[in-house]
Amino acid sequence: MKENSNRVSERIRRLGVIGDVHARLELLERATDALHAIGVDTLVCVGDIYGSGNGTAGCCRLLQERQILTVRGNHDRWFLEAADRDDRLRASVGLEAVEFLSALPITLNINTAAGPALVCHGVGTNDLAHVPQTFPHSFARRSIRVGLIPPRCKLVVHGHSHLQRQRTCGGVLFVTIGALRSHPAGGCIMVDTYTGIVSPIAY
């Protein structure tokens, strides 16, 4: 398990985030270019790189070449589990992409201007979880209590639900990124970690 295997010690203020990718190579490249153009301090991706079609290998290559910090999504996990038993599926994306997806951490801890932050796909190590509409504060408190969210965490940046929204629960700002092009500007944002302002970035 690669939980918390990546740690970024720099205190980041302008955090660029890319949402669920699902093999959309052209959109990934455009979103990455847009975030670099506005001068973010660090760029992260919340996973689900794998998708149908032939874009997965290119997306993995771009994320690696541009050194974008990336966590594993549930679609990436499902692909790897199936590819272990299916040579043709594994060959469909190529060895380099399989190795890239296999090496992705489940979560990423970063230091921001507001304090410790967590980058993940679902919520913490649960890549299928999302902040519920009902009783979100209770959910946040329980997630901290059971260890899905670190105790001093001030910010959780995550994907999975394909929505783009933000809410503060239990003293933690949850920023849900959305998927690339799930709606206008979906899946591409900049978070000012000092002010908590979340800005969708057109691409």
Image (cartoon, rainbow, N blue to C red):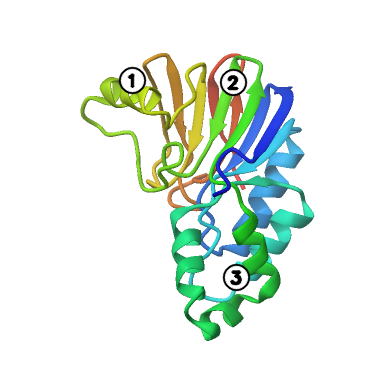
Location of residue 78 (image quadrant): bottom left
Disc 2 on helix, strand or loop? Answer: strand
Q: Residue at x 51, y 74 (%)?
A: 84
**Mark 1 / mark 3, whichever is N-terminal:** 3
Task: Mark 1: give few (<14), some (14-19) or many (20+) Cα within 10 Å.
Answer: some
Q: Residue at x 39, y 42 (%)?
A: 163
Which is closer to the viewer, label 3 or label 2?
A: 2
Q: Which mark is residue 141?
A: 1
Using the numbered discs, state the Cα–Cα distance from disc 1 to disc 2 in whole angstroms.
16 Å
The reply to whether dot 1 and dot 3 touch (C-beta < 8 Å) is: no
Tell whether 17 sits left or right of 34: left
**Does the image show residue 190?**
yes
Please tell me whether residue 196 is drawn above or below residue 126 in the rendered image: above
The image shows residue 83, relative to residue 177, as above or below, that is: below
Mark 3 near mark 2, Cβ–Cβ under 8 Å? no
Q: How far apart, in angstroms, are the residues tagged by discs 1 and 3?
A: 38 Å
The single residue placed furthest to the left in the displayed view is 134
Residue type, numbered disc 2: Pro
Q: Which residue is mark 2?
A: 116
Label 1 sits on a secondary structure element that is helix
Task: State whether residue 26 appears in this view.
Answer: no
Q: Mark 1 belongs to which amino acid? A: Arg
Residue 61 lies left or right of residue 55; in this view the side is right
- The image position of residue 161, as x and y in percent, is 37, 46
- Residue 120, x across and y down, in percent: 51, 40
Q: Nearer the viewer, mark 1 or mark 3?
A: 1
Residue 88's place in the image compared with 33, above or below, is: below
Q: Residues within 10 Å of mark 3 (few under 14, many from 20)?
A: some
For label 2, count other residues whose C-alpha is less than 10 Å away and answer few (under 14), some (14-19) or many (20+). Answer: some
Q: Position of residue 20 (x, y in %)?
A: 50, 51
Label for residue 55?
Answer: 3
